[in-house]
Image: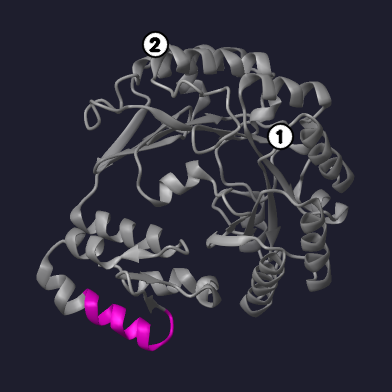
Amino acid sequence: MAGIYLHIPFCDKKCIYCGFYSVVSKTQRDRFIPALQREIRERGNFFSSLYPDDQTIKTLYIGGGTPSVLTPATIKQAIDELMATFSFPKTAFLTDDPDEFEFTIEVNPDDITSNYASQLKQLGVNRISMGVQSFQDTHLVWMGRRHTARQAIDAYKTLRQAGFTNISLDLIFGFPGITQTQWEENLDTILALSPEHISAYQLGVDPNTPIEKQVSQGKLALPDEETCETMYKTLQQKLSQGRYIQYEVSNFCKEGFCSRHNSSYWNRVPYLGLGPSAHSFIGRKREWNFPDVDTYCNPTITELREGENLSPEDVFNEILMLGLRTAEGAALKTLRESSPQSDIFISTIAPAIQDQERKGNLILTPDGKIKIPPGKFFISDGIIRELFV
């Protein structure tokens, strides 16, 4: 299974916390799709070097930025180019079954109208990821979001009326100003809506964002770790009671509705990223496009990306980190085989795993995997760092 990610680098307004590459200017939008089509054609053989017999694309994810600032007709131009260049299942763009083909697009609530939702459905989109972040208007204003809580709920209902049966909603916790009571109200609201998938993230302070500047200048104080951990445990408890399965540190779903595309990242399945700042992975190589839409849209510039070949240490650390972020865990056999040297595994890695197991931070499963207990997911980054080579 292979996946494709399209990065739409445009927003009508930047949120104060967002570290993803995007621009607010509208001057490049007319030039972007032709540039994206050029890159699609150029990358048509991306999967062939390692997968000559089966290059079928099983997941397509359009993210950003804010893809919904583009019209469905504009998005269709990119899809048509993809279909002409890559191999898709016969049922792609025709099925609601994510096992056959999963096609996700990120949207903002205030972009969703009945007409827009219907057109997305006609394009073959069968999964929606909508950034809500909070159902409290005071929070949304502080974040710089364009929508209100009412618009988010109405957009969700509009998507349902358009026939979407696989919807993911995003929430954020652990930011200045949010109380435990408000967080519980947000969770109660999202559970009442009953989406198929919920992603919930603790606010991060990304470089070169307005919030990073405020924190570094001492103008803004983040909640302490104890407060954030309480919110995270509340998240786990309430969603578990709502019969959601936690399959990754920040992701919960109803039975059968995990994100196939994002799961491919965690399982190190090859994927191709297209658009400014998009990342790609195949074999032992990672590549990333330059985060510059002007460069990307200039047809005279041919150098759009750079990359690296992963060292044995890189591969081991990736398998460890990505596996331990999931409820499935990481297979010891795979870790042992990917270890830079067998004596390193025996002398350093195995004792470190045993130490974390004694502390209750790791579980060794009967089928030979190590995983972090859900009750320790909040400190997973620290646990994983102790095992890096």
Q: Which residue is mark 1?
A: 164
In front of the other: label 2 or label 1?
1
Tell me what residue is drawn at x 51 percent, y 23 percent: 91
Is 224 left, or right, of 305 in this rendering?
right
Tell me what residue is drawn at x 16 percent, y 61 percent: 340
Outermost residue on the right side: it is 150
**Res 374 label:** none
Residue 366 in sight from this viewpoint: yes
Outermost residue on the bottom side: it is 358
Tell me what residue is drawn at x 64 percent, y 69 percent: 236
- Element carrying mark 1: loop
Is 348 left, or right, of 227 in this rendering?
left
Residue 4 highlighted magenta (yes or no): no
Q: Main secondary structure of the magenta part?
A: helix
Q: Give coordinates of residue 220: x percent, y percent.
A: 71, 64
Q: Neighbour class for label 1 at 10 Å: few (<14), some, many (≥20)?
A: many
Q: Which residue is mark 2?
A: 300
Q: CA distance from mark 2 to mark 1?
A: 41 Å
Tell me what residue is drawn at x 75 percent, y 27 percent: 117
| Image height of 387 relative to 167, above or below | below
| Image height of 55 relative to 302, above or below | below
Q: Name the residue type under label 2.
A: Thr
| Mark 2 or 1, nearer chain start | 1
Residue 26 in sight from this viewpoint: no
State the count of labels: 2
Q: Nearer the viewer, residue 342 or 27?
A: 342
Query: Which of the 4 image quarters holds residue 155?
Result: top right
- In magenta, the rendered stretch is 349-361
